[in-house]
Amino acid sequence: MLLGAVLLLVMALARGAEAPIAVVYPEIGEPYRAIFEKIVEGIEDRAGPRVVKYAVKPNADNAELKTDLRRQEARVVIALGRQGMKAVVPDRSMAMVVGGVVTLPESEARGLSVISLSPDPSLLFARLKVLMPAAKRVLVVYDPRSNAWLMRLAKEAARAKGLELVAYEAQDLRGAMQQYQAAFAAADSRTDALWLPQDITTVEEGSVLPMVLQESWNRSLAIFSSSFGHVRRGVLFALYPDNVELGKSLAGLALGILSSGNHGGQGMMPLRDVRIAVNLRTAQHLGLDLSRQQQGFDLVFPEP
Amino acid sequence: MNRTIVRTVAAALAVAWATACAGQGDEEEDLALAYGDKSFVTIASGARQPIARAPAVATVVTAEDIAAIGAADLDEVLETVPGIHVSRSPIGYNPIYTIRGIHTQFNPQVLMLVNGIPITGVFVGNRSQIWGGMPVENIARIEVIRGPGSALYGADAFSGVINIITKTVADLNGTQLGVRAGSFKSRDAWVQHGGKWGGFDVAAYLQVGATDGQRQNIAADAVSPTPFSSFAPGPVNLGRDAIDARLDLARDKWRLRAGYQQRANASTGAGVASALDPKGSNFGERISTDLTWQDTNFAPDLDVTAQASYFYITEQSDLTLYPPGYLGFPDGVIGNPYKWERHLRFNLSAAYSGLQSHKLRFGAGTQGDNLYRIKDSNNYTLPPLGTVVDVTDAAPFIRPHSRRINYVYAQDEWAFTKDWYLTAGVRQDHYSDFGNTINPRLALVWETAYNLTSKLLYGRAFRPPSFAELYNINNPVLLGNPNLKPETNESVELAFAWQPASTLQANLNLFRYRMKDILRPDASFTVQNAGQQRGQGLEIELVWEASRSLRLSGNYAQQRSIDEVTNQDAGNAPRHHVYARADWRFMPGWALNAQVNHVADRSREPSDIRPVIQDYRTVDITLRKQKWKNDWDFAFSVRNLFDVDAREPSPAPGLIPNDLPLAPREWRFELRHQL
């Protein structure tokens, strides 16, 4: 009888210690599905069997999910992607960690811990200094409506790395074009580099990007990017998500909330779990000798 | 019938499109910002790609491409590569990889490598006469170089090089089971696994398969015009059983790989003597193994690789060359040639990047090719004629022979001014039978603009005489000549790679080539260095990401090759070849692929007076569902959807007058499970 009571107590304690972490992620087609699968894999690596997974379809009725989260007594939910976020409306008993989104309006991010898909500017600038040791200034054209939070971080990060951030604001395509012309006019290709953030206004793919790539090539001005695809187009390097590690970081945040009991969110945080892709053709055009650094690159272009 | 199919497909597509429009919302917007286009997601979320593996190649086909087009065999993939057309030999319907107009029956002018190591036999210099296809499930990617590559690869890199890279742990991650069944009683089952074991990275693969083969009618064969009875009209014979297995163990700087391929009960195609042989049967085995050591940081800026490899082939054929009753042979003319080969290779190579503006590669190696055993019995060489007699010692088709090859090579990539690179390479091979051959390569590359690269390439290649060409005896249609030298090919190529927009990639290649000392039998059937051939042409490739869910791609290849002895078209190769493909992800997890292959304007060989062979256009579709119930994938394919009568040319003078029919409409169903 005593043994039975001890067993019950141990089980109760174990259950308390192993409070479930709910992971809500989008049911989405390939190849994007693989991204979320890798993030979930990382979460499971870190948080183990306490992870309970829910795949949600777009526009699905989430009443069942809510009931289930309540029944599971989940105190932390990790929502992935916009679909995952939309499916979960946290109440006061539940903290929320978000991953797999680029940015959220500050009002939405309040109270949450959000790891953006935007690489941390300090990591970008650190890489720039390694690949292009002569760099002194970073030029960027951004839309303050979506990237003000990132530029605040970037200013600090640039200062810490001994760089000067020259930021140009633009809120539409025309404005972006004008600001790039201004940036090119002021640029010195020996010491300046242009940063392309994740910004649909100022890094528009159809007209802005080809112009920027063409001008930079002609002026031998280095460009680096927060978007992986730009490396194939001809930017010097980009950082992109290491999804398994991102999953581990999200799980770390969730576990921290569980152990501290502190539900207060940390707001938007940049991505620190990154890989690097480098365009060797562009490096050669810029006169950068990267032969001794190649083993440190995760992907190189042009493709074999 | 065809209209019904079109209507059914159209209806299915309409339903799919309607469902798709209810689609995925704006989830993809964020991911597109981080990754770019859809195609980048696959690359970025894939395995790390070691730098040292990056070769300079013209076309790369990935495992994703192979799965998308529903290919089950290597040949179905190669047909999609610009400048390559896969034709057929009557012997076992072996593939003839016709590259840029160079078409020969045994096709030794194409070098096929598996993980960088040749799988070439020395008897006729090709990939074995008992080929029986190559399954694609264990292929991570295929790299294809068109044009001469002997400066780096040595022998047989003549009209092109096909390098098959098999899957490693990074590609496999866990265990996958698969089955496929389809027309012609074709069935395959496979298992592959990638994981860690005892400190090793382990990748293992086993596939077994069997087929009755397509049985299209051969209306007449070599015996039909004679007074003797023929098996024609009758079906082409393409049944076979296949086993394929591979093991890849890696730890630190070491890698040990082994491969096994067996083809049993392999039928004779349209007959070794262009006379149908329904009874004939072949057995073939290929065993390969290599031990590779690579230190990417052997010394500062120095990457060193050492490799030892072994390759074994046996080909055992029991053939009825001509049917019973032919020339008074009551059981037919019977031949049972068996042969065994082994090849041992050592190679040491290094890449040095310590000099400013120069990247050096150099290497040396030695190779032993040994046709070490033959066995021969037949009923036509020694009396009593009509009775099968062992002729191995008295009058075989060839006797055992061996050759040794030693080689050295060096290459420098020199960035001599901004955006201009000159690559110069040269390789010397010394053959114990015919002596030295030296083959250079030059490549001038200009990074013309941020989205345009221009290249001017020159290369020379050689193809050594095979043992059959050197030493064949007692063969009424091909006698060896020990005084042969290699045939050669020189080519000049101008290539442009242009990316006008992020969603559009275009390539244009223009080429000219000239072959000399072509090895051909003379009037007495003795092989001589007799022919010359020249050719020119172009290839255009386009890839367009038309939308997030639709990708259109294709290529057009045009060539004209002239036999300089007769000044006529060299024959058999298509002058025009068009391939177009659409990949449509119409719903999450679903993909539909459609491809069209148009083969046109194939002249006859100069000595062949038959009318030109008809053009053909085939359409294939593949529907694939990924991650069904999480761990299951399935696919349904229809090849030659409209049941077109497609034919490949039989060799001159046309002993099989109506050419070699390809497969009619064919369906396949495939199921894969990831554990």
Image (cartoon, coloured by chain):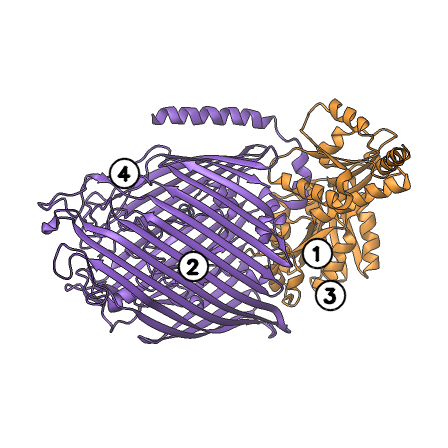
Chain colours: A orange, B purple
Rendering coords of residue B452 (x, y %): 52, 55
Q: Amino acid at mark 2?
A: Ile
Few, some or many residues within 10 Å of mark 4 (<14, 14–19, 20+): some
Using the image as rendered, state which of residue A105 and residue B25 is in the foreground.
B25
Few, some or many residues within 10 Å of mark 2 (<14, 14–19, 20+): some
Q: What's the distance in space between the residues labelled 2 and 1, CA to CA?
A: 64 Å
Q: Amino acid at mark 3?
A: Pro
Q: Amino acid at mark 4?
A: Gln
Q: Amino acid at mark 1?
A: Ala
Give the residue pinned by disc 1. Answer: A185
Same subunit: marks 2 and 1: no
- Which quadrant of the view contains residue B152? bottom left
Observer-side mark, 4 or 2, equals: 2
Q: What's the distance in space between the residues labelled 2 and 3, CA to CA?
A: 51 Å
Give the residue pinned by disc 2. Answer: B287
Q: Secondary structure at mark 4?
A: loop
Using the image as rendered, state which of residue B539 and residue B96 is in the foreground.
B96
Q: Secondary structure at mark 1?
A: helix
Q: Quadrant of the N terminus of chain B?
A: top left
Same subunit: marks 4 and 2: yes
**N-term-proximal mark, 1 vs 3:** 3
Q: Is residue A142 visible?
A: no
Observer-side mark, 1 or 3, equals: 3
Same subunit: marks 1 and 4: no
Q: Is residue B261 above or below residue B191?
A: below
Query: Which circle marks residue A133 in the picture?
Result: 3
Using the image as rendered, state which of residue A268 and residue B636 is in the foreground.
B636
Query: Which circle marks residue A261 in the picture?
Result: none
Q: Is residue B319 left or right of residue A32?
A: left
